Amino acid sequence: MIMMTTAIAAHIIVETAFILDKFSPFLIQSDLFGKRFNSYGIDEKINNAALQTVLVGIGMKAIVFVAPNKIVVKEVGKPRTYKDDVLVKMRAVAICNSTDMHFLKGEIEGITYPLPPGKPGHECSGEVTEVGERVEGLKIGDRVVPGPVYALPCNHCYYCVQGKEELCENPGFADYAYAEYLKIPAKYCYKMPENLSFEEGALIDLLACALHGAKRSNFSVGETVVIVGQGPAGLLLTQLANLAGASKVITSDISESRLKFARKLGADVTVNAAKENLVEKVLELTDMKGVDVAVDAVGRPATASQAVDVLKAGGRAVIFGFHLKPAQINMARVFDRELEIKASFRTVGELDYRTSMNLVSSGKIDVRSLITHHMPLEQIRHALELIEKDLEGVVKVILKP
Ligand SMILES: [Zn+2]
Ligand SMILES: [Zn+2]
């Protein structure tokens, strides 16, 4: 009797601990109150600490960014699937070299910590382990790429109804991917071609973003192109420019190992921007004219102005990198030469994901070479450090939950 009571008491304490814990799982559906919640019932736009709780399910491992530069591995409830959702066992999750670094350092305005479990993981692939009762076209065991995890289009705002999902005014979110399982509406899960590995699948989200950037750049046969920055997205943009038939692809970076990668993946000329003046070098290589298209795949004030300054008259600059600070652009130059400046932020969703999978499956785009490191999910801190300090020739790290 005494033992039984102790066991019950211990159980209650454990449950209370879960309930008081803001990461405990909640049985709130994704469309409750007309808002979008993840499986934990957290509406990030309101306040992720003001929560009602109902404990569910058995646990799973998830990464939690508790504060800038502080990450823990936590046991949280496994999400439950309803109606139109599927549950995906994460088999490969890639670190996003841009967004995740900003979250790590606390550089994004208006974000409060701790982040919901699994956030900001979004480059992932996995296997369907549960399907909601209304799901058609996906079954348990299917190998899938979910996405875009961070911006599920609302499908009814001003832009969505015009078919411009990438500009959705009210994007929702699924669960995030730094966890063992991810719940997401089935319509945002795309079956992988058989010859794609889970590791390649985890890079499809990044390729879909780069593909959107390539479409916004409108690379055409015979054009000259500059890709500023050869991080993972820059390396994919270099390949996409080649695939589109660019006559010359000039790439820049400040890392020799990245430039070596760029040459391997098809860059015609590489410029080390730490040692050489990119704009002068590009003019030299183009009879002092400049290039047709330049993409800023870094996101710093200097790289945005480089992308404009390397253009010939009538040229196009595309801002692809994530900018945190305002940049100075020479508007007189933009005016005189009738330059175009565009941006590329999100993907068009299904179309870009499916095209990206086809490009990898057919061998036209190489994502595999970008993967330099593999490690268990628990070693995320080490993975982020490699990227932050640019160690061991790192390009993409795959985590295995
Ligand atoms: Zn990403
Ligand atoms: Zn919308």
Image (tube, rainbow, N blue to C red):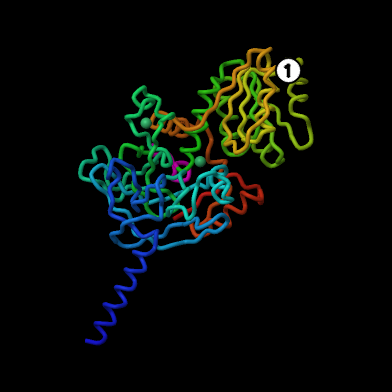
Residue 155 vertical placement versus 54 (above, below): above
Q: How far from the left and from the top, in percent, is residue 162?
A: 36, 22
Q: Quadrant of residue 307?
A: top right
Q: Point out the quarter of the image occupied by ligand 2.
A: top left
Residue 82 vertical placement versus 168 (above, below): below
Q: In which quarter of the image is residue 68?
A: bottom right
Q: With 208 as the anchor, is 5 left or right in this view? A: left
Name the residue rendered at 41%, 60% in the picture.
61
Is residue 363 found inside the magenta-colored segment of the image?
no
Callout 1 amino acid: Thr
Q: Name the residue under label 1.
A: 286
The residue at the far bottom in this view is 2
SS assignment at label 1: loop
Q: How far from the left and from the top, in percent, is residue 173?
A: 39, 42
Q: How far from the left and from the top, in percent, is residue 327?
A: 65, 31
Name the residue rendered at 51%, 49% in the picture.
398
Give the quadrant of the C terminus: bottom left
Closer to the camera in the image, 394 or 83: 83
Q: With 73 as the anchor, is 390 left or right in this view? A: right
Name the residue rendered at 28%, 59% in the picture.
54
Q: How far from the left and from the top, in percent, is residue 92?
A: 45, 49
What stretch of residues is rendered in magenta? 193-201
Name the residue rendered at 59%, 36% in the picture.
323
